[in-house]
Image (cartoon, grey):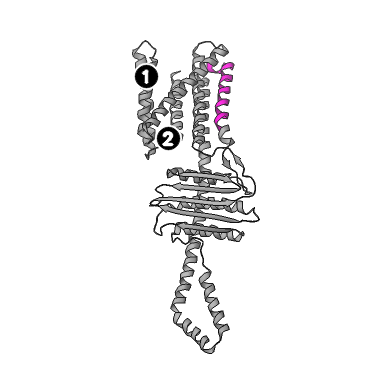
Amino acid sequence: MMLVLAIVEIFSVILQRIFCDSTLKKKKIRRYTDYLVWGGYFAVFNGVTYVLTYLGDGTSNIWLNILLFVCIFFVTIRILYTDSVRTLMATTIFMYMSGMCAELLVYYGKEFLAWTDDAEVTLLCTVLSKIVWYLIIKFTSLIIKLNRKAELNLQDWLEVFIVPVCSIWILISVFITGTLENYFWGFIVVFMILLINVFTYYLYDKAKENMEKQMREEILKNQCEYYIRQNRESKEWWEELRKLRHNMKQHYILENTYLEKEDYEALKRYCSENLKFLDKKDFISNSGNLYIDSVVNYKADMAEKAGIKVTANTEVPQDAEMNAEDISICLGNLLDNAIEAVKELTEDRVIRLWITTDGNNIAISIKNRYKNALHKSGGRYLTSKEDDRMHGIGLSIVRQIVDQYAGEMEIREEDNVFDVMILMYDFLT
């Protein structure tokens, strides 16, 4: 019995860590430090509770337990997370209250089923209360993500309910068949069910993380293409301009010869050829900043091939340093979405881009018209591309980057005009 209870308490600590990691801002610490702090919390709280129970009459004082939990848990998350004291205290209170609610739900469920108070029922109710607590924690985490405007879909909600609810059903079925009366098999059942609940959470979370990582890698690959193309075209342009300047004397001599011969047609053709060269590299973005210009000019060229005009006003310092991956993801995804939308139009096929900076802050605005009604699922805009395996993930990652810089992202839809505005603080270095 003691071994099973120890497993259950370890599961409780894992639940608390899951919730805190998904809702609070973690400090930059080594992984083993994180494990050490949570392990210390487990040892201290359970050790102190056991000693107080042992020194007493075999029962524990509920108010003393509450005080111990609040103090020890608060100190633990204070060490590991950067949120305000108010937020950490609210998290501590929620953690205790949700655990208490889970125990009450299981208690009234036991009374409703008229189960007798014996060792097996006590063990079952203890395990069930932790799984119900797990369900409450995961559900609350999704609600918090929704309030933060995170992109959630049906799979996220199903993942919350399916495994915990099925676990509760299995445990009750096992209890009814009498399997829990056998200590060894009862321990195996409880251990496996708790293990499944933890691993399904981490595996699902890891799968989403890998999908986003894959998309980031694709964007980085495209980013390299932006830079290679921008550097190649700039090099070719400057090489031709160098040759033009080097041969300037010869150009004037030849033009003067045409004038002396009054061969105005030949002079006109010669001047036209030189003007074509000077005009052929009229980039959309000419801020001089490689990060911005390479992405904008590359996407503008893609849009031009599709018969779409891009107007850009990019006011960015030439020497401004920024995270190349983040700016490529933001601009690349937003411009891709705009191009896909404008492709469906027969008129007003224009994308308007505006980028400006103020100190270390950057503001981005992209406007374009769209034809058909935009579709959403759980707050996520669905793509119109044939490859829909990453519905809305691009926009979701953009929002994550904006949040990373404590910025703001606003999307407006009015009169078939899609307007995305982004503001990121301390983006430039």
Of the two numbered discs 2 and 1 in the rendering, the one whose residue sits closer to the viewer: 2
Q: How many residues crowd around disc 1 within 10 Å: few (fewer than 14), some, or many (20 or more)? A: some
Relative depth, front residue between 21 and 380: 380
Q: Which residue is mark 2?
A: 24
Q: Is residue 32 left or right of residue 172?
A: left
Decide: is 158 above or below 215. Answer: above
Q: Which residue is mark 1?
A: 49
At label 1, which amino acid type do we have?
Thr
Residue 90 in view (yes/no): yes
The tag earlier along the polypeptide, 2 or 1, is 2
Instruction: Determine whether the residue tagged by mark 2 lies in a helix, strand or loop.
Output: loop
At label 2, which amino acid type do we have?
Leu
- Residue at (56, 61) in percent of width and height: 301
Instruction: Determine whether the residue tagged by mark 1 lies in a helix, strand or loop.
Output: helix
Decide: is 319 above or below 30. Answer: below
Q: How many residues crowd around disc 2 within 10 Å: few (fewer than 14), some, or many (20 or more)? A: some
